[in-house]
Amino acid sequence: MVERLRPADVRILNADSRETPMHNATLEIFEPGERPFTYESLIEHVTDRITYAPRYRQRVLRFANLATPVWIDDEDFDVSFHIHRSALPKPGTLDQLRGMTARTMTRRLDPDRPLWEMFFIEGLEGGRVAILSKTHHLLVDGVRSIDLGQALFDTDPGPHDRVPDEWQPRPRPSQAKLLGEVVSGSLIRPWEATKHALEEMERSVSSVFDIGGTVNSLATVMLYRADRQDSPFNHDPSTQRRVEFVRTDLSDYNKIRHAHGGTVHDVILGVLTGAIRAWYMTRAESVANGRRVRALVPMSVESETEASQIGAEVVGHLVDLPIGEVSPVVRLHQVSYAVRANVERGKAIAASSMARLPGFAPTTFHALGARVAASNATAGVNLVITNVPGPQFPMYLAGAKMTETFPVPTLHPGFSLSIGVTSYDGQVSYGLTGDREVLADLHLLGQCIQEALEELLESTSGLRTRAARGRKRP
């Protein structure tokens, strides 16, 4: 029996277009270890670990508009086709990596092959190398497959034993067999066939009216146009991207939360609130009292089922960021209150629990967050923010130590900005993806993040001084 795509997967597949390619990416930087870290060693390592992510050796087979697409093994699968070698002019800088990442994010994955690829990038300062990984939303569903990146990492440089793998591609079923199974399944579950037919009809009508292929429902188009606030973050994306990376220290967030309460997650959202406020002011946008930006924040919650291999499910919560508030401390408290209300309703997973998951779990959780955003980022949402805590110790890939990691989130229909945040080994790293035409000043938002963090840090100095004076009293 063939495995058909579920309705949510079909919607994601239909939303994939030149303007909104449905893939996430991660940029990771490594320093060489005792063993050489080369393009060949990366291919060998991926070949060894890919057995943990079986979806990465499958591709989607579509039947035009006749039936639901199915998963089949790629009979011509070759790891080296998906891993590309590239280089920056020495000495390569983070600015050059930004440019390469932005260009890579604009290119859609080959629909006739497994929907992922990696770029092994040489030429960085100090002999370092970078890996830019792209994964389609379809490959990571939290049920049948984790992100390949999670399976590649170890907690020590190794070497490690090889993973037994006897995988052989299943022969592709005949067209008659595939259609027969799809038809029989539709007879058993006629409501699925009807739903699929309606979705395909809406998609076809959208194409006739030339709305750019950025959404797959006329009703969705109307909602985007009618209910969105006047926000620079809510423009249909073009085919080109900008990316921005910001590195900060986790210790600063701990100082702020110890002084003002809340969690590191609260502080990150508080920093982003202050940064957006400051960035709005550079654009002469209104930050009047009461002005808010509504963010969809995918969060991990406890699951009462065994549907997820990683022990949790990711759901979307709406959090209003109070950019109209002048005081950074009041902004932080307002954000903490809003997040706490969501946590109490959803039983959020503790950051420490997520950080202890095997491998480098942030890649999987960012991918799951992107799926949530694809399904829930509709009318009234201005921005998608995915924050994932990672391990606070070094991770290794094929013996090379990862020194930095940046999420590179996708843009969904109706959005011109998306923000991903990952904490790892004492760092909190922001990855911003923006539309190239709409957000020419994306770099300023990156600067505003640094300044908003410094503003909150300054607010703790007086508290520390008063606390120290209190301890000196007899």
Image (cartoon, rainbow, N blue to C red):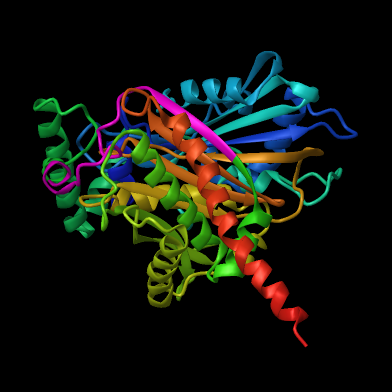
Q: Quadrant of residue 440?
A: top left
Q: Does residue 265 lie above or below 305 as drawn?
A: above
Residue that sits furthest to the top in the current view: 89
> What residue do we see at 58% from left, 51% from top?
362
> What residue do we see at 27% from left, 56% from top?
289
Instruction: State the extent of the magenta-drawn residues as a range.
Output: 223-246
Residue that sits furthest to the front in the current view: 474
The quadrant in which the C terminus is found is bottom right
Is residue 241 in the magenta section?
yes
Report x, y in % for residue 102.
Answer: 48, 25
Report x, y in % for residue 135.
Answer: 50, 37
> What residue do we see at 82% from left, 31% from top?
32
Is residue 11 in the magenta section?
no
Q: Nearer the viewer, residue 330 or 398?
A: 330
Q: Does residue 242 lie above or below 139 as drawn?
A: above
Q: Nearer the viewer, residue 178 or 372?
A: 372
Q: Does residue 242 lie above or below 178 as drawn?
A: above
